[in-house]
Amino acid sequence: MTEFRIPTRIVYGQGSAALLASIGGQRLLLVYDNSGVADMAMEQLSLSPITVRRFKADNRYTCEAEVMEGAKALMEFKPDWILAAGGHGAMDLAKLMRIFYQRPELSMDDVLNGSAADIEISKTRLITLPLLNTNGGEAACTAHLADIVMGYESEVRCFGLIPDIAIIDPGTLIYSSERDEAQSVLSTLVLAIEASLDESTASFVRPMALEAMRIIFQNVLAHFSAPSQRHPLLYAQCLAGIACSNSSAGLSSTLARATALTFGTVSFGELAAVYLPSVIRLDKEQSRYLQAAEAMGLNDGASLASVVEEYADMLGLPLSLKEMGAARNAFLKKLSKIAHRVLSTASTGVLPEKEPQKIIEQILRSAYSPQEQQSTP
């Protein structure tokens, strides 16, 4: 049996954050990683009698210590609502800390090994107010936890993490940087392409994924010349989040999570967009990329891979792991270990059927530099 779920309510359009003034309840914990978006939320919440406390999230990676500190804050404050405002750091933290508020007897290992996959969260409700760098987390049933020492992120996936309300207000865009926008374009594109490939959920997921791609294709150039028209990118990000929330994580995403902290502070969108062209070019089943290519006004998978690189270049982001500062010798020493990590975390059906370790290493080599790709047998 396959399920398809979306947030119970999506409110969108300029000024939609005004909903916060009338949500009801007595207490709200504001989890944020961007002060501008937090202040925007507070302006609306000040019109309500609700009592608000603020909790600052790391805007790069969410770690276990931060989650446990957040869960402690929830237990002390006992809010009716949590509001995650800002980017992916706020989204991931708010979702994960809710798990331990609902089930304090669980350990992080329980959550990571899937023991909380069927959890129903009823003690508090979640609202999201995103800007442009959430990786679609405002509407997804996923959250990501970083292992700072080992240099990778783990994905926690369960329907209990889906927000109750997602407020998609273009007013947040004034707090997004150019790098946020670039990262969002690429992460949206990668997540949507990967979701469109999942045949098991195609009837419900693919239309959303393809629409997210079409929005990117139609607006990625226009929003630079007309900043007031950036809001379609915010909507595309949300659509991609819903799509990937209801499909298996793709190989490019898995590679990006497995190397999240390996090459320094690099965003998910940057890493995933470096891997995706190599994944496409080394895939023998090129025909499965046709619908994604057509949504971008292209004819085949090879063109799709090239467009991802062109967008990254146009947006000023690195095109290879080498450009990210990965030293060749250090990279080669880690190659086998990284490939093994990818194999151990990839979803069923994502990996190549034959010689998966070899193929993953080929993808990593080709993502390191164009020269590596040319020299790979």
Image (cartoon, grey):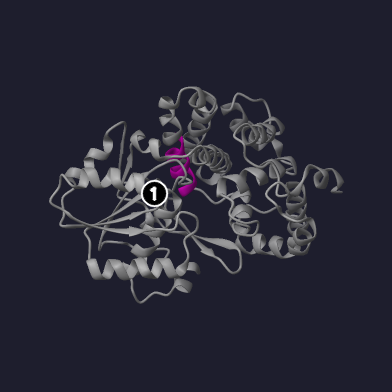
Q: Secondary structure at mark 1?
A: loop
For image coordinates 27% across by 33% down, the residue present is 15
Residue 246 can be seen, yes or no: no
**Image vertical order of residue 29 relative to residue 44, above or below:** below
Residue visible at 36% across and 34% down?
A: 170
Residue 267, image x and y in percent? 56, 49
Compared to 141, does 301 lie above or below? above
Closest to the observer, 275 or 54: 54
181, 349: nearer the viewer: 181
Q: Position of residue 194 (x, y in %)?
A: 58, 43
Q: Would you name the residue on which mark 1 appears?
A: 34
Task: List the single residue furthest toward the left.
Answer: 49
In x, y percent, where is residue 72? 32, 71
As drawn, which residue projects farthest toward the bottom?
105
User: Residue 157: x, y in percent?
Assistant: 46, 58
Predominant secondary structure, magenta span: helix
Instruction: Report the front residue among 272 and 183.
Output: 183
Q: Amino acid at mark 1?
A: Asn
136 relative position to 369: left or right: left
Residue range in magenta is 236-246
Check if residue 242 falls in the magenta segment: yes
Regarding residue 59, the answer to whether it shows in the image is: yes
Q: Residue at x 60, y 45 (%)?
A: 270
